[in-house]
Image (spheres, rainbow, N blue to C red):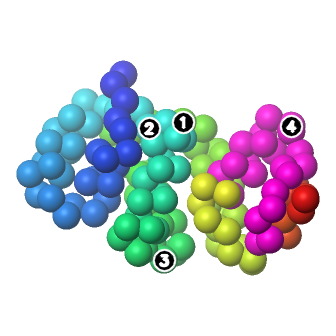
Amino acid sequence: MRAIDTNVLVRMITRDDPRQAAKADAFVATGAWVSLLALAEATWVLASVYEMSLPEVATSVRMLLAHEQLTIQDPDVVEAALAGIEGKPAVSFSDALLLELARKAGHLPVGTFNHSLAKRDGAEKL
């Protein structure tokens, strides 16, 4: 199976360049794999460049999870991270993903200087 990068994910979500969005759609039509790294980078771009809110980012990630032609790496971890960004205090998808990956691997606590992340179960403020 082929894989796609951050830019392809962003085009698929934002549809801001119709030509590139069409090329992205055509490329994934036969199936494509999405790494957690590409997904984390894409959510950062959506939040910082496109100024999407956390709920909008979550909706975008759910769209990718439901996409029939995409296979997301560790979808259970992605679902747990989505639950993490919907909780209080708010943390970025990337921070929630990092925490859930550590949890799945059995490597808790996650040491952090991030005040919001440090309030989460499984994280420890340094």
As drawn, 98 above or below 120 = above
**Residue type indicated by callout 4:** Gly
Marks 4/1 in contact by CB < 8 Å: the verdict is no
**Residue type indicated by callout 3:** Ser
> Which label is found at residue 34?
2
Disc 4 crowd rating (10 Å Cα; few below 14, some 14-19, many 20+) is: few
Region of the chain picked out in magenta, as a range: 96-117
Q: Secondary structure at mark 4?
A: loop
Instruction: Kindly identify which residue carries mark 1.
Output: 73
Q: Secondary structure at mark 2?
A: strand
Q: Nearer the viewer, mark 3 or mark 2?
A: 3
Instruction: Kindly identify which residue carries mark 3.
Output: 53
Residue at (46% x, 68% y) in the render: 47
Sequence-first disc among 1 and 2: 2
Residue at (51% x, 66% y) in the render: 58
Percent x, y of residue 123: 86, 57
- Marks 4 and 1, how far apart at CA: 18 Å
- Marks 3 and 1, how far apart at CA: 23 Å
Is residue 105 covered in magenta? Answer: yes
Residue at (11% x, 57% y) in the render: 18
**Residue type indicated by callout 2:** Val
Instruction: Confirm whether residue 52 shows in the render.
Output: yes
**Residue type indicated by callout 1:** Gln
Residue 85 picture quarter:
bottom right
Extreme residue toward the left, this view: 19
